[in-house]
Amino acid sequence: MTGESVAQGCPVTPQGCPVSDRAAAFTPFGDEYQHDPGAALAWAREQEPVFYSPELGYWVVTRYEDVKAIFRDNITFSPSIALEKITPTITEADEVLRSYGYAMNRTLVNEDEPEHMPRRRVLMEPFTAPALVEREDMVRRMAREAVDAFVDDGEVDLVTEMLYQVPLTVAMRFLGVPEEDIGPLKEYSVAHTVNTWGRPNPEEQVRVAHAVGNFWRYAGHVLDKIRQDPSGPGWMQYSVRKQAEHPDVVTDSYLHSIMMAGIVAAHETTAHAAANAVKLLLERRERWEELCARPALIPNAVEECLRYSGSVAAWRRVATTDTEVGGVSIAEGSKLLIVQATANRDPRHFEDAERFDPRRESAGEHLTFGYGAHQCMGKNLARMELQIFLQELTTRLPHLELVEQDFQYVPNTSFRGPEHLRVRWDPARNPERHDPRVLEVRHPVTIGEPSKHAISRAMTVTRVERVAERVVRIRLEEPDGKPLPAWTSGAHIDVDCLDGDEVLTRQFSLCGPPDDHHAYEIGVLLETDSRGGSRWVHENAVEGATFHVRGPRNHFRLDADAERLVLVAGGIGITPVLAHADRAKSMGLDYEIHYAGRAAEHMAFLDRLRRDHGDRLHTYVPTEGHRMDLARVLADVSAGTQVYACGPDRMVQALEELAESWPDPGALHVEHFSSALGALDPGVEHAFDVVLSDSGLTLRVPPDKTVLQTLREHNIDIQSDCEEGLCGSCEAPVLAGDVDHRDVVLGRGDRAAHSRMMTCCSRACGDRLVLQL
Ligand code: HEM
Ligand code: FES
């Protein structure tokens, strides 16, 4: 084991620093981690977010931001160890493996650049939306047949009878493995998991080595068969055909290794994810029933299940240079276990993170599929399978219940799902016995990320109050009075506002008391140049009206460790600032509020602010002879001070200029309400046309939208993952026009050729691009 101090027997990091007791005691091979890795490491995320595990010889990373940053930077944090054995093997086991000619090497998931990305791109086509649509009928038929086989039995192990078997057959069909070869795969897959991510004892190592050796031979045998006839629709047949065109990119070693690793990647991950999802939902009966009543929620519920109880709990990277993670120095060569399961429940990223909420808008931001250049290529196939399983089970067996049982897991760091899932129901109550039309229902499957509109909550306006000239405060509650997801200061909700036939979504900061779990309160200014959003809200906010709401989300979080907080608001920008001020007060922090408005009667919440914040409030009202002088207000932004601001663009711009001279310009936090759009500056960008040669459409891309957003608005399906030019999934072929490339995916040659582009970020140099879509 690495890093143990010999002198006192107390473990140390490779740099010789002592390891805390909890870090020293951490094991991913015990029950606690297996049952709920997110919860097992919650202590670390809060107290020691990056710690050294002497048991593993790995640095363990637990916060969302750090895990994502590592996934994002596959150059500093190489994936080359992703399939390395986490437990060093004994010589005897190595010899057994050698006797089978075992030579597992680079695939995709553990390949470095510059080899990885060209290979990923050459092999991507079978994973695209049009290719996956072709697979939907097959997946549904298999899921339906599996349910047919036990629907009248009243009790079944869902894993054995459906959730293991169907993903296995789907994976084999997707890869193109002949069905007669499926037999021994379960034993092989478990052996591969234990061999790669588990802690087998020496005896087990030898047994596992035989199974893995056989798996390797088996993969070679299947590949040979495929090579004899590479004409089928499977991904492996496709890969063999691509090898003929690109022998340097799709190598022999790659094909043999992916033949074996691909089976596990496509099967175990999805089978476990399905079992985790059904278990999670049945344990929360109310949620299960919500999906039975509203199947449109299923695509988002799948994302929330993957967030809350994903099937890949942790992944691995190795540092290629001396670097830093979350403020901790990491030396070149250090190995990192990046724990998606804890990151996915990080309250710094997800509001009310411990709540399982199928309507969570940000559910799709989980890291269970990884992120960036290596993000799971099969994620949309997995999503499709999971949606279909939940659709079939909620429609045909809505009265399903969990049998009381002890859940067993294969002890390992990464792949996680119960080995058995016993459920029961009363077959006499099967809906199809009373109404056979149940079997005709076919709910649509969403390929890619779920639509946001399906998850909105219909909320009732229960109070409307004028709080300033043209400003109303609106209270919204669930019609059945149920508690709402909790939120922290700085959070906002999205409200769907109708403008003619168009739905405009507008963001409003929450400004009521955060401990009121039964209502959300927003303050809304009627903008003079409103395009419809605020006008719609003002016209429709009457008691008893229904608003469609999503969220809450928070891009404007308060740093509760700051020594001093300066909160700056202009006009209606007071709403998030008010929430921050209330929170700062309740936490006993040092804070001051600077609030500027046109005239006192235009300034919302003044009475409340004066009452609750007394001397900490400074107001600036030009009609009373006080203008806000930002330079004076912010003359002393020393280290330890954090500034939070929300207000008109002019004010924000002035603040950004001032911040340039602060010791830490990052101390300025501004609320924008524009998420990804914020990256585009409409003042600098120009509009252009994209002509879609296959669809015969010409679309105008405005300066404040990406090509991807414009395509989606016109129902052109296009995959995307990172939406920041990192992963290559949103690529589109370009037939004419020069591209202003802004991604990091394409190499110099591709850029110069202007024959392809990443639609999430790249734009046109001129006024027109022709895309082959
Ligand atoms: C990569 C998870 C299903 C094929 C990955 C990675 C993760 C993952 C964590 C590494 C990501 C990274 O390093 O950033 C999952 C989960 C699944 C699933 C949780 C199911 C719920 C599938 C399926 C397939 C597949 C069904 C194939 C049909 C791949 C491939 C890669 C990959 C080819 C390598 C991509 C690359 O390195 O460029 N997956 N996966 N996965 N997955 Fe999946
Ligand atoms: Fe990742 Fe565009 S490059 S979505």
Image (cartoon, rainbow, N blue to C red):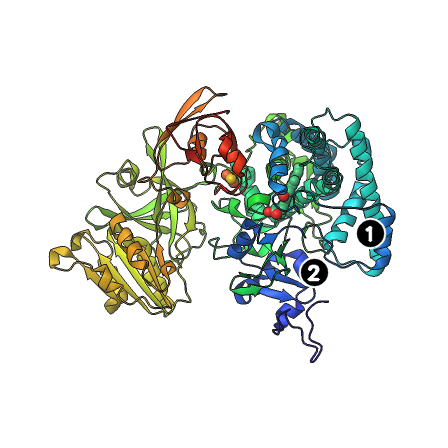
Residue 252 in the figure: left or right of residue 398:
right
What residue is at 17 percent from the left and 55 percent from the top? 600
Q: Amino acid at mark 1?
A: Val
Residue 68: percent from left, percent from top:
54, 52
| Label 1 crowd bin: few (<14), some (14–19), many (20+), radius 10 Å | many
User: Please, which residue is most extreme toward the top here?
Assistant: 696
Left or right position of 184 against 251:
right
Q: Quadrant of the N terminus?
A: bottom right
Q: Can you tell which quarter of the image residue 661 is in? A: bottom left
Work out whether residue 267 or residue 423 is closer to the camera in this orientation and state it: 267
Q: Which mark is residue 31?
A: 2
User: How far from the left and from the top, in percent, is residue 695?
Assistant: 48, 21
Place residue 447 in its image quadrant: top right
Identify whether 157 is placed above or below 708: below
Q: Which residue is mark 1?
A: 208
Q: Is residue 731 above or below residue 264?
A: above
- Residues 185 and 80: in front is 80
> In this orientation, does residue 395 appear?
no
Q: How many marks?
A: 2
Q: Residue 4: x percent and y percent?
A: 69, 72
As helix, strand or loop, the secondary structure at mark 1 comes to helix
Quadrant of the rendered image holding ligand 1 = top right
Instruction: Name the residue: 63% across, 42% down.
Output: 116
Q: Residue 199: x percent and y percent?
A: 75, 59
Q: Residue at x 22, y 64 (%)?
A: 632
Mark nearest the camera among 1 and 2 is 1
* Distance Cα–Cα, label 1 vs label 2: 21 Å
First reached walking from the N terminus: tag 1 or tag 2: 2
Viewer-proximal residue among 244 and 63: 244
